[in-house]
């Protein structure tokens, strides 16, 4: 404690307070960086566990030998089947989680996610159209159709928001409306489709990583990775937006442009995951909340932490889905719901009113 002894003592106390505040901020930031590092270590452990699980019994040493190419059979299994699955799981989890974090920030709604914006429903209808038009024979057309309709949905939402000002309420209402519209269209297409097509549609909506290869991973990476630097650049603006539109505007934030850009980038990242993996629920909703409890609400740390947690959750769900009922594989969308629903109820019951 600083006790004034002269006229200049007041300024000396202020300097001490500034130094104490700076030290506290630095220590807090360092703890958050360490926490992100620990989460990354958990991601590495989850990836190694995923590489060791499958129909072929491969131990940890076998996997490590296969990664460096010492065994032909094991190398083919690991590099052609398991590594692409792991990489796509990381990309999908990252894209959905970061997209959910941005959606919750720009909409200021704890229940917001790419699904709230109607992107998932639009992508689902696009996939259904691709299945019906091709008979389910072209995965490329199915994925392309899902991606196109996901982006069409986001642009329709932005068009409605532009007509009525890009407020969070307008975006939410437009997203819910388009979600119900595309869900109805999807149900109608299922009603008029053949039994084989309905079976493929239902399987696609379950979500799966079994059909991804390096080509799909490359395309998904082009949609999920490039938006990250822009979102990190907007981290401070997202922090200010969480306080309120008026406060953010008074501090120089272009709220309308931030919301428009956030919707586009969040939709692009979610579309990159959904179009190849199907509908994977709860990742975009749950991951940001877990990261917020661990890291806090500063988006400079929250965005990477949420992305890593999303990747860990998708990896863990896929690994459990391949091991719980082996040799049968439980679709990843079912496993993420099993993980997400209990945590969702935990948030509802245990978190205080001020948290929301």
Image (cartoon, rainbow, N blue to C red):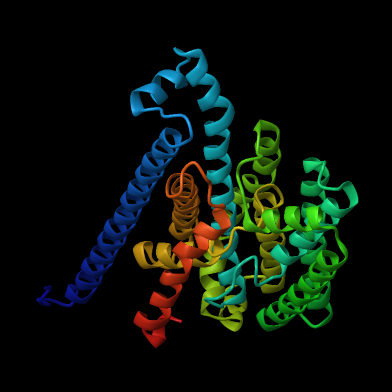
Q: Residue at x 17, y 74 (%)?
A: 9
The image quadrant of residue 112 is bottom right
Identify the residue at image location x=72%, y=69%.
Answer: 118
When asked about the image quadrant of residue 183, the answer is bottom right
Question: Which residue is nearer to you in this view: 62 or 356?
Answer: 62
Front one among 139 and 169: 139
In the orientation shown, which residue stands out farthest toward the bottom? Answer: 353
Residue closer to the observer: 281 or 335:
335
Q: Number of marks in the image?
A: 0
Q: Is residue 171 above or below residue 201?
A: below
Residue 60 x, y percent position in the rendering: 35, 28
Q: Quadrant of residue 102?
A: bottom right
* Residue at the far front in the pictured view: 195
| Left or right of residue 71: residue 196 | right
Residue 293 spot, x, y in % from top left = 37, 67
Left or right: residue 135 compared with residue 79: right
Q: Residue 195: x and y, percent? A: 80, 57
Q: Position of residue 144 (x, y in %)?
A: 81, 47
From what the image shows, is residue 193 above or below residue 356? above
**As drawn, is 272 to the left or to the right of 154?**
left
**Vertical placement of 263 versus 320: above or below?**
below
The residue at the point 45 percent across, 73 percent down is: 344
332 to the left or right of 344: right
Q: Of residues 121 and 168, which is closer to you in this image?
A: 121
- In the picture, the quarter occupied by the N terminus is bottom left
């Amino acid at each position: 404690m600083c006790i004034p002894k002269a006229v200049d003592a007041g300024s000396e106390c202020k300097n001490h307070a500034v130094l104490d505040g700076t030290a506290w901020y630095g220590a807090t930031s360092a703890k958050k960086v360490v926490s992100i590092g620990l989460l990354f270590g958990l991601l590495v452990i989850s990836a190694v566990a995923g590489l060791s699980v499958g129909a072929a019994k491969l131990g940890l040493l076998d996997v490590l030998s296969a990664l460096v190419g010492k065994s032909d059979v094991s190398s083919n299994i690991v590099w052609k089947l398991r590594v692409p699955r792991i990489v796509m799981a990381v990309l999908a989890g990252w894209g959905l989680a970061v997209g959910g974090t941005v959606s919750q920030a720009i909409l200021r709604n704890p229940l917001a996610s790419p699904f709230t914006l109607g992107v998932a429903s639009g992508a689902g209808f696009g996939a259904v159209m691709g299945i019906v038009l091709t008979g389910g024979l072209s995965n490329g057309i199915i994925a392309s159709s899902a991606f196109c309709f996901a982006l069409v949905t986001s642009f329709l939402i932005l068009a409605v928001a532009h007509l009525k000002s890009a407020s969070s309420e307008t975006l939410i209402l437009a997203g819910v409306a388009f979600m119900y519209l595309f869900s109805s269209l999807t149900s109608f297409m299922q009603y008029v489709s053949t039994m084989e097509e309905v079976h493929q549609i239902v399987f696609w909506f379950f979500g799966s990583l079994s059909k991804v290869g390096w080509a799909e991973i490359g395309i998904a990476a082009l949609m999920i990775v490039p938006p990250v630097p822009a979102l990190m650049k907007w981290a401070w603006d997202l922090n200010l937006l969480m306080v309120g539109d008026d406060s953010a505007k008074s501090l120089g934030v272009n709220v309308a442009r931030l919301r428009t850009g956030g919707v586009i980038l969040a939709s692009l990242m979610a579309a990159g995951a959904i179009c190849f993996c199907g509908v994977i629920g709860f990742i975009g909703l749950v991951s940001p909340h877990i990261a917020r409890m661990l890291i806090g609400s500063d988006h400079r740390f929250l965005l990477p932490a949420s992305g890593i947690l999303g990747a860990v959750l998708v990896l863990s769900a896929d690994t459990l889905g391949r091991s719980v009922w082996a040799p049968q594989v439980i679709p990843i969308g079912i496993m993420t719901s099993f993980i997400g629903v209990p945590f969702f109820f935990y948030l509802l019951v245990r978190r205080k009113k001020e948290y929301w």
